[in-house]
């Protein structure tokens, strides 16, 4: 998400508190907020995909779990 869109979310929030929003602005705000949530989820998923738990022996404990998740995600891709 671009900084311009994040600034627009903030501007719409301030306007909603000060004077209210038109229906078009409410729809724009909802769409921007959804786009923001989607980008946060995607970013977090990317970070978690590269996170590993290593036990005291040095084995990746979650390696099998992540491999299963990757295989499952590939099944659901169009």
Image: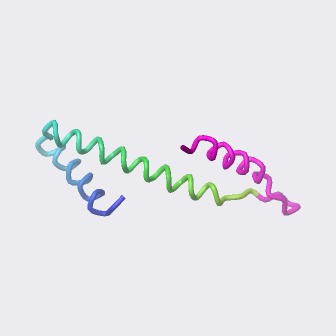
Q: Residue at x 84, y 63 (%)?
A: 58
Quarter holding the N terminus is: bottom left
Q: Which stretch is magenta?
A: 54-78
Residue placed most toward the observer, 8 or 66:
66
Res. 26 image quadrant = top left
Looking at this view, name the residue that lies furthest to the front.
Answer: 78
Q: Residue at x 41, y 47 (%)?
A: 37
Is 71 included in the stretch rendered in magenta?
yes
Q: Is residue 65 depicted above or below 5 in this figure?
A: above
Looking at this view, name the residue that lies furthest to the right.
Answer: 57
Q: Is residue 47 depicted above or below 32 in this figure?
A: below
Relative placement, left or right, of 11 versus 48 is left
Res. 53 image quadrant = bottom right
The mark tally for this picture is: 0
Q: Residue at x 43, y 48 (%)?
A: 38
By what rule are the colours in the image chosen? Answer: rainbow
Q: Residue at x 26, y 52 (%)?
A: 9
């Amino acid at each position: 998400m671009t900084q311009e869109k994040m600034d627009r979310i903030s501007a719409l929030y301030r306007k909603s508190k000060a004077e209210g929003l038109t229906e078009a602005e409410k729809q724009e705000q909802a769409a921007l907020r959804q786009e923001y949530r989607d980008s946060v989820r995607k970013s977090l998923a990317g970070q978690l995909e590269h996170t590993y738990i290593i036990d005291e022996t040095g084995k990746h404990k979650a390696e099998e779990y992540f491999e299963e998740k990757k295989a499952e995600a590939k099944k659901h891709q169009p």
